Image: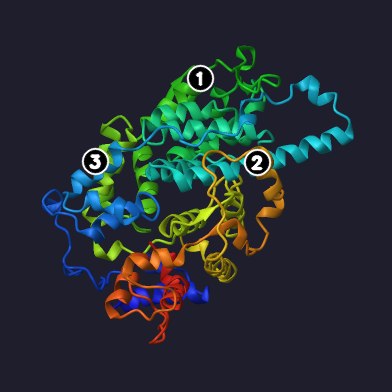
Amino acid sequence: MPVSSERLAVAGAAATALASMQAAAQSTTPAHHAQRHRAASAPVAADQTDTDLLDADDATHLLIRTGFAPSPADVAPYVGLTKAAAVERVLSTARTDAVTPLPTWTNDTPLTRAERNALTQDQRRDEQRKRSQDYDDLRAWWMREILTTPSPLTERMTLFWHNHFTSGQDKVPEPQLMAQQNTLLRRHALGSFAAMLHDVAKDPAMLLYLDGASNRKGKPNENFAREVMELFTLGEGQYTQRDVSEAARAYTGWGVDPDTWRFDWRVQQHDDGIKTVLGHAGPFDGDAVLDILLGQTQTAQFVSAKLWREFVSDTPDPAQLDSVASHFRSSGYDIKAALRALLVAPAFWDERNRGVLVSSPVEFIAGTVRRFDVTYSSTAQFARTSASLGENLFYPPNVKGWPGGATWINSSTLLARKQFVEQLFRATETARPHMGGAMTKAAASGATSAASGAAKAPVRPMPASMHFDLDGWLGRYGLTAGTVPGLSAQLQMQHAVLPLAPVDAIAAGSSAESYLQALLMDPVYQLK
């Protein structure tokens, strides 16, 4: 299974955590997988998009990039389809809601202003502890949904938008509000970006996070106005400070009711004067400014480029990106239209763009658990592990979210990822039943720590809380843990778990268990 020098550089950077994996994503030399049938150096021509039929490698590539680690049963229906038909199948089967019921406490209304003011110091401390535990509960809930969803693309896109329309625990004290925002993002995840933008702008969690709730006539707060341009629609350098100041006036009057915690339109606090934003003048309100932003061609370009970096590579192809952005804009910001154009683009299927993206902590954990049919008694442990690897759900590092890409890998996180693999191989003896459905609040609270500590907590072995049926998995290749796999079985196992050739040499005569563990310890296991 030969591998190019550029891809060796990718894996070497991950292994030593001394160099950026970003440069490797720009590699121009194709890699070859041992079991691929086509020459990797043959680029996919634009007119072949609908005529080339998918083999198992193509189908696996599509499902890994649009979800998590697919099972052979997931891959099989896509083999033999055209690229367009396969993409359409992925898009048409996506859900708009979660299959895992939210914790029951998310239906509770947070304390009113009067109730908060009446709390004693001890009660305030208890209330803060409860909110922290509820956030941990919410993280465990989302991780369960990611692990069990029949619609992986939905969760991938909900994660994507969570990192695009960033809000988090540090400025949103009530976890019910973040649960509501998560539902909003999932509902719009593959729908209309325009509708999502308008809804997110009035979302209580977003208003609190970007200080929009304190925006009033005469004292406009510019935080939301700036971020909606820089992070949500146009990108840096596409607007002026005056545009920000004028737009902030338009958003005045938007707030959050301190008793109901719902969006509150305060007309008496709204500046109804003339504003000039991006060359447009009028007595705009917030929705009118959002429509102005949606009318800019740069918005479709900016969002399409983020989608490209999420699903294809770190370096967009200008011509192909323009085509994706054009489809996105002409469709009226239909997210499926953008993804459809992106996933049938030649660059998505190009061999040079396979195995060049770094799996995020959630992708790494969920992919491992799903790939090896791991059973577990609690998903709180996986949420904690993700936090220790740098991706603490509902708690992004700042307003820009997680930078992702090569930043996911450093000496500390790579070691923690390997510790998770070691934990997996220790969890092969005592099985606990897999608890279906949502976790109870008590179970999540007892299994997790405060969010502020979770991000720094080391990965600790918990073999009793999950189980990996190693012999059952190896049995697919006619092996047991103690047997030595032949060359054919070795290649099949490599093919099942790695996106390209392993970098580290694996000792000849290794047992099947040792061989599999060596594959998972190889740096390229972090790539997709």
Residue 73 left/right relative to 238: left
Instruction: Determine crowd level at label 2: few under 14, some 14-19, many 20+ residues with C-alpha closer than 10 A.
Output: many
User: Which of disc 2 and disc 3 is earlier in sequence?
Assistant: 3
Q: CA distance from mark 3 to mark 1?
A: 38 Å
User: Which of disc 2 and disc 1 is earlier in sequence?
Assistant: 2
Query: Is residue 235 visible to us here?
Result: no
Which type of secondary structure does the marked residue at label 2 adopt? helix
Q: Decide: is 293 above or below 114.
A: below
| Kind of residue indicated by mark 2 | Tyr
| Kind of residue indicated by mark 3 | Glu
Residue 190 picture quarter: top left
Which type of secondary structure does the marked residue at label 1 adopt? loop
Q: How many marks?
A: 3
For disc 3, the marked residue is 88
Residue 523 picture quarter: bottom left
Q: Nearer the viewer, residue 413 or 74?
A: 74
Q: Which disc, if any, is residue 135?
A: 2
Tags 3 and 2 touching, CB below 8 Å: no
In what quadrant of the picture does the C terminus appear? bottom left
